[in-house]
Image (cartoon, rainbow, N blue to C red):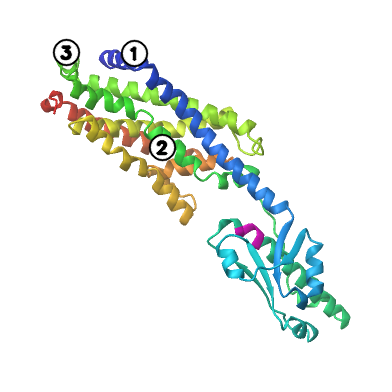
Amino acid sequence: MKAMITVMMKELKDLFRDRRTVMIGLLMGPLLLPVLMLGMFSVMQKKVTSQSEKMLELPVIGAEHAPNLVAWLNGQNVTTQDAPEDPTAAIRNQDEEVILRISPEFGDKWRGSEPALVEILYDASQQDSEIPVRRIEGLLNAYSSQVGALRLLSRGISPSLVQSLAVSRKDVATPESLIGRSLVFLPYLLILSAFIGGAHLVIDVTAGERERQSLEPLLATPASRGGVMSGKIAAACAFGFLSLLLTLIAFKIGFQIAPGMKGQVDVSVLSIARILLVLTPMLLIGTTLLTLISASVKSVKEAQSYMSLLIMLPMIPTIFLMVSPVKNALWQFTVPFLSQNQMIMNILRGEAGDITEWLVYLGAGFGLGAILWIIAARLYHRESLAISA
């Protein structure tokens, strides 16, 4: 233990001498990540709000076939206008988001009390068209329901007779859970920050010192190699923990001052502490795994080449949950990356989780970190470790 603390303090002291590295690790990362995430969310929220509330300009083909419908739309925050000559090309070229086409047989169908055809032209590959299309569909359905009810009343039939069920919705979602659905990439960013938070220091104190030939004198001291390795891992964990704490504090401040975000996400001190506890096993796993890799390779460049693969690992559960959402199950809290993702999303939704989930998660996380620690310690006992490439 004494050797571990000594090595830990030595590595931290050497690190903090490099002020540029410390500034990048403790300021640039924790500041840029929240600014990027909250900036993207604010822009997206502002865009959705503006598209939902602004006057919708709707090109209409065949407006003369349904003057009543066009007049009704003009009274629903919609401005109808002439359609371009080539509507398909206009949509594909993103000159128009959505175009309404009214069938020439609209009048005959209407007078015969038959369903009259109207078409909504849009490009599903353009995300900007999603909200206008939903608005137009909602308006057309509302108009159809009103006209259908009037037709039944004109024939002396109550419109309620054609409705066998009265369906209503009751949304029991909390504001935190609704906003949490929009922050699907936040767990990935936090997990990635924890997973590679001490990467620079871990690679430098093993593969870097090996290249500089400063590792051999350290291993030649009476201190046990396990103690030396533990000190290096502890130093990297301490630096990563500090960086992670600053990141979470920046997110807390950002959610409190970002437009439209205040009060929408639970960023209380207790929630921040829970997220920090969730990410601590991932910090240990990432640090020990990088130590294992650094002790196995021959150079810093080779160790850094593994970073591209490691960065992809936290992304796997995020993409999986976006494509195929799953309900929480106890086994999920034993799977690295997936368990952290589920735990963080639960906290953001205001769900604390039961004690069993926490025990299973912490046991599996720290257990995997301990296994990787033991494997790395065995690699530190190899005589070839101190020999530079």
> Which residue has dot 2 on it?
192
Q: Is residue 360 magenta?
A: no
Dot 2 amino acid type: Leu
For the C terminus, which image quadrant?
top left
Q: Can you tell which of label 3 and label 2 is closer to the viewer?
A: 2
The magenta segment is 129-133
Residue closest to the eye, 377 or 205: 205
> Which residue has dot 1 on it?
13
Give the x, y percent position of residue 373. 27, 30
- Residue 255 in sight from this viewpoint: yes
Residue closest to the eye, 199 or 61: 61
- The local crowd at label 3, few if under 14, some if 14 to 19, many if 20 or more residues have their Cα within 10 Å, is few
Instruction: Of the two numbered discs 1 and 3 on the same chain, state the one appearing first in sequence.
Output: 1
For the N terminus, which image quadrant?
top left
Left or right: residue 151 versus residue 43 is right
Dot 3 amino acid type: Thr
Q: What separation in Å lies between label 3 and label 2 (alpha carbons)?
A: 35 Å
Q: What separation in Å lies between label 1 and label 3 (alpha carbons)?
A: 19 Å
Left or right: residue 367 versus residue 168 is left
Residue at horizontal 40%, vertical 20%?
22
Give the x, y percent position of residue 21. 37, 22
Give the x, y percent position of residue 201. 32, 24
- The local crowd at label 1, few if under 14, some if 14 to 19, many if 20 or more residues have their Cα within 10 Å, is few
Q: Are marks 1 and 3 in contact (CB under 8 Å)?
A: no
